[in-house]
Amino acid sequence: MGNSVLMLDDEVFSNAALREEVPWERYGITAVSCASSVREAKVFLQEHPVNILLCDIEMPGESGLDMVEWAMEYTRFSAEPMVCIMLTCHPEYEYLRKAMQLGCLDYLLKPVDLEDLGVCLEKALIVIENLREERRMKFPEMEGNRRPNLIRDKAIPYIEEHLDTSFTVSDIADYVCLNPQYMMRLFKKETGLSVLDYVTRRRVERAKELLRDQSYSVREVG
């Protein structure tokens, strides 16, 4: 199976140089694409599977670290896994620390040594193959590049099953394996309602259903 790379750098010549100089096919990489802004990279990632994101830090608008944070969540349950490698001129510890916290595989300084990048790419491909196998075992329902709808397929069924018990947003997020804040944004985007509003609405609807069933008293329904 071929692997794909997306290079994100607002310095167009930097992207072009790496695209020409790196022997991509030696590492089993068959598709190399470039983006010059975070917005462009996000659009591309939503339309094409990307296995390796090579990302600069400082760019106009959103930073490369913002992109990595978004990309790691977006591709977390994609059939095709993705790893991120930072390519930057900034050796500052805080940047390195943040990149590692976000799950970046490595942090390389410009000008990039091609041998160092090659070693990093080899390591990335090992990680990708391991992630592929892990995802096939954990999510056998994945086909091609289809991403499972975690809100419709997992979060909402969890809520329905627990309507008559006490649970928190964190409980739902843990169940679907997402960050709570990201899960809430995804839930609102998918349903048009906040988690709290959705749960409240469903509990009211469930109460009405039970009240129509005369085997339950008002107190029991409450």
Image (cartoon, rainbow, N blue to C red):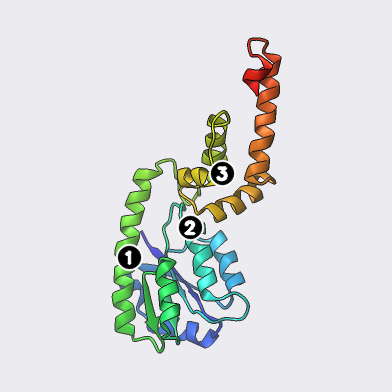
The residue singled out by tag 1 in the image is 125
- What residue sits 43% from the left and 76% below the top? 86
For marks 3 and 1 on the same chain, the one whose residue lies earlier in the sequence: 1
Amino acid type, mark 2: Thr
Q: Nearer the viewer, residue 72 or 12?
A: 72
| Element class at badge 2 | loop
Please say if 133 is above or below 118. above
Amino acid type, mark 3: Ile
Q: Quadrant of residue 2?
A: bottom left
Question: Is disc 1 surrounded by few (<14), some (14 to 19) or many (20+) residues within 10 Å?
Answer: some
Furthest residue toward bottom: 111
The residue singled out by tag 3 in the image is 151
Q: Nearer the viewer, mark 1 or mark 2?
A: 2
Name the image quarter holding the N terminus.
Answer: bottom left
| Element class at badge 1 | helix
Instruction: From the top left corner, tell me how far across and down residue 21 is, in percent.
Output: 39, 84
| Element class at badge 3 | helix
Name the image quarter holding the C terminus.
Answer: top right
Q: Nearer the viewer, residue 47 or 170?
A: 170
- What residue sits 32% from the left and 51% below the top? 133
The residue singled out by tag 2 in the image is 75
Instruction: From the top left corner, tell me how far across and down residue 66 is, in percent.
Output: 54, 70
Q: Nearer the viewer, mark 3 or mark 1?
A: 3
